[in-house]
Amino acid sequence: MFHDNYDIVVIGGGHAGCEAALASSRMGCRTLLLNLNLGNTALMPCNPSIGGPAKGHLVREISALGGEQARAADASTLMIRWLNTSKGVAVRALRAQCDIKAYAAYYTRLLQTQENLDVHQDEAVELLLSGSRVSGVRTRHGSTYEAHAVVLCSGVYAGGVAHVGSVAFPSGPMGQAPANAFFESLPSLGIRTDRMRTDTTPRLNFDTIDLSETRRQISEDAPLAFDIWGEKRVHSTDDFACYFSHTTPETHAIVAANIHRSPLVTGEIETLGPRYCPSIEDKFLKFPDRDSHPIVFEPFARTNGSTKEVYVQNFSTGLPYDVQVALVRSLPGCKNAKIVKPGYAIEYVYLSPDQLSPTLENKTIKGFFCAGQVNGTSGYEEAAAQGLLAGINAALEVKEKEQVVLRRSDGYLGVLVDDLTTKNTNEPYRMLTSRCEHRLLLRHDNADRRLSPIGRRVGLIGDGRWETLTRRWERADEEIQRLRTTRLAPSQEVNRALEKEGAEPLSEHTTLAAMLRRKNVTYRLLKSLSPPDCPLDEDEVFHTETELRYAGYIEKEERTASRMKDMDNVLIPEGFDYDGIKGMLTESRQKLSRFRPRSLGQALRISGVTPADVQLLAVAIKARH
Ligand SMILES: Cc1cc2nc3c(=O)[nH]c(=O)nc-3n(C[C@H](O)[C@H](O)[C@H](O)COP(=O)(O)OP(=O)(O)OC[C@H]3O[C@@H](n4cnc5c(N)ncnc54)[C@H](O)[C@@H]3O)c2cc1C
């Protein structure tokens, strides 16, 4: 039988696996990426888009850490827009519609040309152990690959069962084959698994939709890019747009008449699906009073590009195929629309993420890392971000260096991993801005300041990019300092300019920073009154304005975050015996023994563990030292 040696084996070539393999190989570890089917590399089995609120923040953080998803999105963008601009600086985020083939091709090319990385089509069927540590992987072809670390990024392929009405069949996403063997062996290794569900929409043929009955939405005309170092581009609106429509009373009548045929109602599906992305039948059951829901037709490529397939956003369903046809035809513009692929619900197996430490390594099997949908998350961005972190930490494990743990105040990725490891999840976990308590600290515009020093330290950000960043930071910092120290006198010229913009005139000497906090005063106006030595680019202007306008709030959040950081810095010794702590509630003791938190901060965030018991724990840790 074939045998080979690697530092790291990554299982899966989806969004998580691509990032994990690229990170570990770039950090100098000999890496093998195994994928069931190399044709599905970086497949988007759902909507052809990257980003959006919270997800866009994750993409920017991936870029800041030295990952690739932002560049894959930029390389395949068909249309890009800012979202949430009226809801505040913290939550505004980019969202791009992508050409799904170009997105996959970008990753495929990188994987195939990356030094230290081999890519191979085969199915991992068994995790090999030596005592309580990983020693490699066995594959369907009978090959064994020895490795110091294994990163599992196998998505929704394990135990996959697709449902279209009463028709149920074993399947991975989008008609891919399922892969069960690897997971079947996990319970015997003491690893807990569970099942959950997700759904997707029917895909239509673009040419069969009457667009005159829809509302067209095009790209923003400003140059935009996800990648921190990327070239910002304006995207052509001639041959790509999305089209808004809505469900009608007829749609709702069809759901009502057929809801008894939904596998959710017949009891064939018992697993929980994505709360924030409900199927049309879920919406019908949960919001019976609504008679219309918005939907969006999102093409997978340009008008004359590689495919005519169109995704129907907000229209996922597991209803029978004949009902899907009727539902689609009830939508404005779809009287003659043809379904290319039916929608379906898919149930699958995932690993309970409370078994992971915040490095994404399994707490009991050393060297076994897990990332992506296999941890119970949903979304390309959530998967890619975890893959990057797991790849970095697997490489650090191989090099016997301290692993990266991100705190909640470091980034959305820190929040995501902390939520998974301290709260577990029994329904697909999606990143939301509301999950973050430090939103004002975790902005799109400062992802590089928060995370690039980590990317640099682990070796994913080279000299050139690092210099570009530090020059940008210096420029913006100097300008912030200048605005804080430069005072303007209340001259006629200044007050005329202020009044022209609808701002209050000055009555005394005032710093530019204080002026910026006034209504209708912008950096552009201040720049005209007091030009800087070195002009800032658009991103630097946004950063400067935000830091100064919200300085008071930012400082307040920093103080709160710093208190939690102190708690996160008190580490709980490995194998700590909670039974020895007198006076602790049984629930706290059980939860702490099960989750085995890494720090006091993590212990505090486990639901059911009281602050009083965390105090007892703090005393016990101190006493044992
Ligand atoms: C039907 C459906 C609807 C969805 N809807 C949404 C949505 O509305 N919004 C959203 O954000 N996200 C949605 N998602 C989720 C999103 O597609 C996933 O979260 C994301 O693709 C997960 O990325 P991943 O890398 O973890 O796994 P995947 O992209 O699933 O990749 C897994 C990879 O592992 C490989 N693999 C599996 N087992 C093995 C093995 N044993 N050996 C070797 N290779 C293996 C597979 O070939 C594949 O390459 C949906 C997914 C599905 C399936």
Image (tube, rainbow, N blue to C red):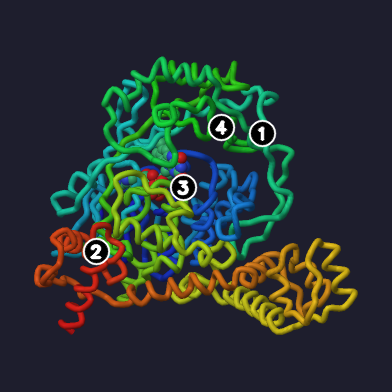
Front of the two marks 4 and 1: 4
Dot 4 amino acid type: Pro
Dot 3 amino acid type: Ala
Residue 500 percent location from the top left of the image: 86, 63
Front of the two marks 4 and 2: 2
Considering only order in the chain, which callout, 1 or 3, is on the residue closer to the N terminus? 3
Dot 2 amino acid type: Thr
Cβ atoms at labels 1 and 2 below 8 Å apart: no
Splitting the image into 4 quarters, where does residue 140 fall?
Answer: top left
Residue 226 percent location from the top left of the image: 59, 57
Relative placement, left or right, of 306 versus 363 is right
Q: Which mark is residue 42?
A: 3
Considering only order in the chain, which callout, 2 or 1, is on the residue closer to the N terminus? 1
Dot 1 amino acid type: Thr
Crowding at dot 2, Cα within 10 Å, few <14 / some 14-19 / many 20+, comes out as some
Cβ atoms at labels 3 and 1 below 8 Å apart: no
Q: CA distance from mark 4 to mark 3?
A: 28 Å
Considering only order in the chain, which callout, 3 or 2, is on the residue closer to the N terminus? 3
Q: Which mark is residue 303?
A: 1
